[in-house]
Image (tube, rainbow, N blue to C red):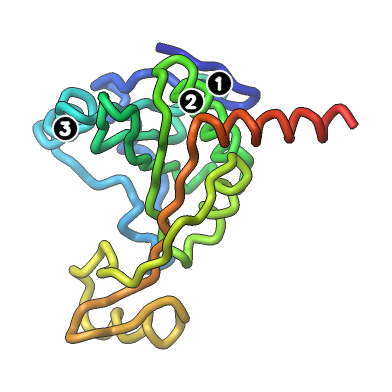
Amino acid sequence: MIKVGKKTIIRNLERKDIDNMMQWGKHDDSIFLHYNFPDLTERERDIWYDVKAKKFGRKCFVVENMKGEIIGYISLRDIKFFRRKSELGIVFDPKVINQGYGTDALCNFLELYFNRLRMKILTLKVAKFNKRAIRCYKKCGFKIINETLEEFQDQDMDEDLKNYIVQNYTDFKLIKGKLMTKYYYMKITKKKFVIHKEKKELLITL
């Protein structure tokens, strides 16, 4: 399954793609470290592929630029086939961030998701501090439906680093030794996607 956009191509994940992802750059900011693609052994890469691509209720797609370079991946989890809904995950090579690939890839993927996969609802969870990602989601038509305070994904850091993050990032708190941060839950439906797309096309023609 392939979907071509203006700057990106979406296709199904293959096992060999994971070897290429191992060459991606790394985030330096401490609050984004858990977005780095992990250093995996060959066996661990096999397992990662099986979980992302073969496990029931999951699907995974890679994002390529027009040179055929793998620059990101988009995953679906908790797929409810009867209700036609799932949850989105999206990760990009830090080396290509802020080049417009994220918005193009996501809008491109939504076309595939709603029209070719015939799904009806897509949700996601994003950290409130991730302003860049939130802007991308809003550009593609997602709306915020809830805000929560939850455990930060990366709890393995030492206490000094946790304290540094709390002191320097307003969306974080330290509660009983747990690093907490605010998350947005966002959602888009097929109907809202169609309306959003029509509005964008109208603005282009005006």
For label 2, count other residues whose C-alpha is less than 10 Å away and answer few (under 14), some (14-19) or many (20+): many
Q: Nearer the viewer, mark 3 or mark 2?
A: 3
Residue 25: % across, % down: 42, 47
Residue 197: % across, % down: 66, 30
Marking on residue 51: 3
* Distance in Å between CA atoms under marks 3 and 1: 28 Å
Residue 126: % across, % down: 41, 56
Q: Which residue is mark 2?
A: 64
- Which three-letter amino acid code belongs to the residue tagged 3? Val
* Distance in Å between CA atoms under marks 3 and 2: 21 Å
* Distance in Å between CA atoms under marks 1 and 2: 8 Å
Say which residue appears at 41% left-offset and 19% top-offset.
118
In the picture, which quadrant includes the N terminus? Answer: top left
- Which three-letter amino acid code belongs to the residue tagged 2? Glu
Q: Secondary structure at mark 2?
A: strand
Q: Nearer the viewer, mark 1 or mark 2?
A: 2
Q: Are marks 1 and 2 in contact (CB under 8 Å)?
A: yes
Q: Which residue is mark 1?
A: 67
Instruction: Specify which label sits upstream in the sequence, 3 or 1.
Output: 3
Residue nearest the observer in this picture, 46 or 22: 46
Say which residue appears at 25% left-offset and 47% top-offset.
38
Residue most extreme to the top: 1
Say which residue appears at 57% left-offset and 36% top-offset.
192
Instruction: Specify which label sits upstream in the sequence, 3 or 2.
Output: 3
Q: Quadrant of residue 42?
A: top left
